[in-house]
Amino acid sequence: MTTATGSAPAPLLRRILLQGKYEAATMLRNGEQLILAVVLPLLALIGLTVTPLLDGLGDSRVNVAVPGILALCAMSTAFTGQGIATGFDRRYGVLRFLSTTPLGRAGLIAGKILAVLAVLVIQVVIVAAVAFPLGWRPDPLGALPGLCMLVLGAAAFTALGLLVAGTVRPEATLAITNLLWILLGALGGIVIPMQRLPELAQNTVHLLPSGSLGEGLRDAFLHGAVNGNAVLVLLMWTVLAGAAAIRWFKWN
Amino acid sequence: MRSPKSPVLTIDGLIKDVGPLPTLDGKMLRVVSDVSLVAGRGEVTALLGANGAGKTTTIECAQGLQKRTGGAITLLGADPGTAGAELRARVGVMLQDGGLPPSARPIPLLRHIAGMYRNPRPLDELVQRLGIDSFSRTNVRRLSGGQKQRLALAAALIGNPEVLFLDEPSAGLDPQSRQLVFELISELRDSGMGIILTTHLMDDAQRLADYVYIIDAGRNVAEGTVAQLLQHNMPETPHRDHVRTLHFEALPGLDFTGVLAAEIEIRETRSGSYTATGALTPEDLAALTAWWAHHGIMPGSLSMEARSLEDVFLDISGREIR
């Protein structure tokens, strides 16, 4: 075999796009992840529109339900799905191997963020395709702030997922991220709005990434409003979890 | 330390602490205390040592995977601790545990990694050469140890590197794969690649390495070509190149004083079991057998072998289990 000299990296953007595409395809091929990312949110959407759980919180059940379902989608993909995948990649040395290629550590993280956003776009399209026939009529003014809020929420949950995946064993990551998905999904102000939670919970939930994302999305899609508090809380979680992940993430 | 014509990697006084560890009351553990080495282009340089000697830590510092505590490392003229994608593109790495995603299939995975480089090696050539086509439709998690190693080697080579790091390359390899991988490594060396490998297998080092560094307890303990190391600690004689170990069994308590050349001592390692190591000459053998004939002794067993790197290694690092 011959050795050519002058091995060179592909351009940075191409490396990140490739990694994003590869990770997104891996997520979409994984059955368990698909259940978490698409099937369970859709079941929750249908459940909330056929039961009276959300009655009296807005003009229709589906209008109140959909923002929470979108928040749930962001948590599925950015936190639970991505966290578990990263945890096992760490166990199998995949993170270390890829960081020796031209991709590098920063490119790897950028690729993961890109993959989360790509899967989130697909989730939004699917949820919208189911929700419109069910009668979803979002406030048109809320579309842009809503989507920005969703991206911010995904950023906060990606940082949290990486923090968990990078600091504990993959089995523990699996347990923690799945458990929090259920707890935060049901009681953390994501699908069930704060007003329907016990009074004690109402005071804390708006400080959680789940509660602020759920309320922020409902304010956007129901009322066309920007919830400044929710933006601040999500920014704070993104910065804190991101800094902690940079500080404590173990690559091996 | 030696100075190869065209060095690709220089490590000077490497120190690496890990921890703090709860098992050491929260103190740091020094896993590498003083390792220096030079690896050249067109050569296979081996780091030989027992498990836990600090070999993997040393090369992971050289790959930029671990931050060093002290010392200097230059890889292709750059510091791997701070260098970027330009350097990583010129260096191929095969990790000890492979580092391949279990759910991936070999060909798409290699194609993906190839995309990270501007001028990757042709995929078909590598796939064929390493026999990957025979398991190209199987998930990584279902591959045998040898298949995984071959795929990991392909992944390390796909970017057409100038320097190749191999951490325990023959781990898990069946004899056929081992032959294939060793032939390829020799060929890559001949084409000018600088290859650095770690191994705890003396046989690997003896077959592949142009230059060997023996590492023990985080520091260099010996270095040289295989031929030089085989003469390690042997006295200067014209017969230094036929160092042998002779074993025989006979009556216990025999006194062989004056039978062999002065620098070769016959030790009774167990009752009635004798070993002589050194540069034995035909005259030594004749003198020994004549002595037996004279005393009417017929050995129960008799064997002789060339000194192996393993003997040298055990002489240097001690025979006790640690």
Image (cartoon, coloured by chain):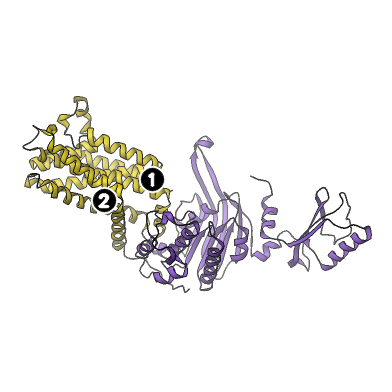
Chain colours: A yellow, B purple
Which residue is the site of mark 2? Answer: A116
Q: Position of residue A116 (x, y in %)?
A: 26, 51
Disc 2/disc 1 C-alpha distance (Å): 19 Å
Question: In what element is the residue under mark 2?
Answer: helix
At label 2, which amino acid type do we have? Answer: Val
Q: Residue at x 12, y 37 (%)?
A: A50
Which residue is the site of mark 1? Answer: A249
Question: In what element is the residue under mark 1?
Answer: loop
At label 1, which amino acid type do we have? Answer: Phe
Q: Position of residue B161 (x, y in %)?
A: 44, 67
Classed neighbour count for the residue bearing mark 1: other residues with Cα under 10 Å, few (<14), some (14–19), many (≥20): some
Side of A163 relative to A148 (left or right): right
B206 or A133: which is nearer to us?
Answer: A133
Side of A240 relative to B25 (left or right): left
Which chain letter goes with mark 1? A
Asked if labels 2 and 1 share a chain, the reply is: yes
Q: Residue at x 38, y 68 (%)?
A: A8
Side of A219 relative to B96 (left or right): left
Q: Quadrant of residue B132?
A: bottom left
Can residue B212 be seen from the camera position used here?
Answer: yes
Residue B307 is labelled as none
First reached walking from the N terminus: tag 2 or tag 1: 2
A39 or A93: which is nearer to us?
Answer: A39
Q: Position of residue A226 (x, y in %)?
A: 12, 42
